[in-house]
Image (cartoon, helix red, strand yellow):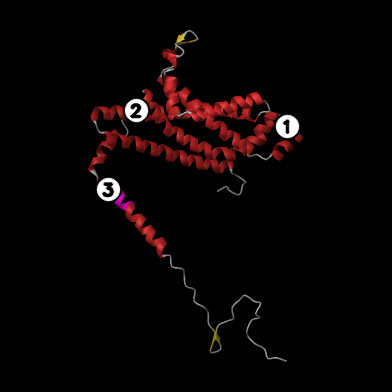
Amino acid sequence: MPPQTDLLPPSSSAPPPVRKDGDDVVPRIVPVRRTGRWTAAVAVLILLALALNSVIRNEAFEWDVVISYFATASVLRGLWLTLWLTAVVMVLGFALGALLAVLRLSGNPVLQAVSWGYVWLFRSTPILVQLLFWFNIGVLYPQILGVSTVTLLGPVTVAVVGLTLHEAAYAAEVVRGGILSVERGQIEAAQSLGLGPWRRFRRIVLPQAMRSIVPPAGNMLIGTLKGTSIVSIIAVQDLLYSVQLVYHRTYQVIPLLLVATLWYALVTSLLSIGQRYVERYYARGTAGAR
């Protein structure tokens, strides 16, 4: 009978134990050196520190002027109009967008074509062109319902109409994508229980679709907040136009633009936090909820 051996059979992938003077030697674990990662991190931190130092110490930014104008009455009025305009446009845009999404998903080819045509038209045209078109609509229609178009459609009304119609085209695709994300079997199960169309939509489709609707809707909300700055081109006194009025008088362009930038950054940060909590609410019970 052949003598016993400590070697493992050739078929085994495990290495043979290391022995020295009859005692087992525990191999020393050496961590992987990540020199490149730490070097890159240090380089980025140095660059960020240099950039921050240049911003703080550069007298051309005129931080004292930024602080003095940050909470003035004119700036706060412009901020309030920006927030109001954002809220109104989002509500009206998603209401119209939801209707367009339903028409697109309907079995009527005419309604489908109308919805598709609307989305195509308003997504194909720059928002600035749309605003200027609505601002000059009086050239085509001097009167609407017997009232002068110029009187009926002031700058703020034109901003609401133009931004809402533009927003609805994108909202329609967001809502349509959310509805299509709901499994067909869920709807068929609700139909088998005898639920009507409205109850199916409210109790089955909408709660599940919101998981797909909320993230892009949150991005649209933030985009709309910043996009309202374009209404300054038609003399709507939003946040940007308010600071423009000041620096046209004082010629302190950079610090006044910083005032607007800081307000936009602050509001978008708050909206991002709110979006995160709304996403977590609608993601309850799913693997991605956190």
Q: Label the magenta part by its dominant secondary structure.
A: helix
Name the side, left or right, on which 24 lies relative to 266.
right
Name the amino acid, label 3.
Answer: Ser
Alpha-carbon span between mark 2 and mark 3: 28 Å
The residues bearing labels 2 and 1 have C-alpha atoms spaced at a distance of: 51 Å
Task: Tell me which corner region of the image, top left, top right, bottom left or bottom right, holds residue 262.
Answer: top left
Residue 29's spot in the image, x, y percent? 49, 73
- Residue at left 61%, top 49%? 287
Q: Residues within 10 Å of mark 1 (few under 14, many from 20)?
A: some
Tell me the amino acid under the disc marked 1: Leu
Q: Do tag 2 and tag 1 residues touch (Cβ < 8 Å)? A: no
Q: Which mark is residue 195?
A: 1
The amino acid sitting under disc 2 is Tyr
Label ID, residue 54: 3
Along the viewing direction, whichever of 31 and 121 lies nearer the viewer: 121
Q: Quadrant of residue 129?
A: top left
Earlier along the polypeptide chain: callout 2 or callout 1?
1
Residue 251 in sight from this viewpoint: yes
Q: Secondary structure at mark 2?
A: helix
Q: Position of residue 43 (x, y in %)?
A: 35, 57
> Dividing the image into 4 quarters, which one contains the N terminus?
bottom right
Residue at numbered disc 2? 241
